Amino acid sequence: MHSIASNAIIIGVDTHIDIHVAVAINGLGARIGCTTIPVTADGYRQLAGWALNCPPFRPDAQAWPWRPVSYPHRTLP
């Protein structure tokens, strides 16, 4: 298990077909912000801009790679 600094910013994204919802929390679990974006190229740019402007963003901060979770796609009858 990794220790997380209290001033860390963690961003999670809940993905859906038409929208994605992102939330930012600090290392203590307190919510910093939340946004909803469309699933488009412009929406992904909005998400990146939002993430970069989440206080207290530090340009020297270490970024960890995303670990996507995928579920099998299925068509409902």
Image (cartoon, rainbow, N blue to C red):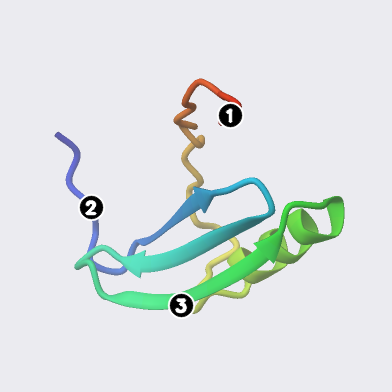
For the C terminus, give its image quadrant: top right
Query: Does dot 3 land on a helix, a strand or a loop?
Result: strand
Is the residue under label 3 in contact with that under label 2 (CB below 8 Å)?
A: no
Say whether disc 1 or disc 2 marks the residue closer to the N-terminus. Answer: 2
Q: Residue 77 shows which numbered tag?
A: 1
The answer to whether the residue labelled 1 contacts the one labelled 2, judged by CB atoms less than 8 Å apart, is no
Quadrant for the N terminus in the image: top left
State left or right for residue 44 relative to residue 15: right
Element under disc 2: loop
Asked whether 41 or 52 is in front, the reply is 41
Q: Which SS class for mark 1?
A: loop
Which residue lies under the disc numbered 3? 33
Q: Is residue 57 above or below residue 48?
A: below
Kind of residue at disc 1: Pro
Viewer-side residue, 18 vs 28: 18
Assess disc 2: are there few (<14), some (14-19) or many (≥20) residues with their C-alpha within 10 Å of its C-alpha. Answer: few
Would you place residue 49 above or below residue 72 in this image?
below
Local crowd at mark 3 within 10 Å, few (<14), some, or many (≥20)? some
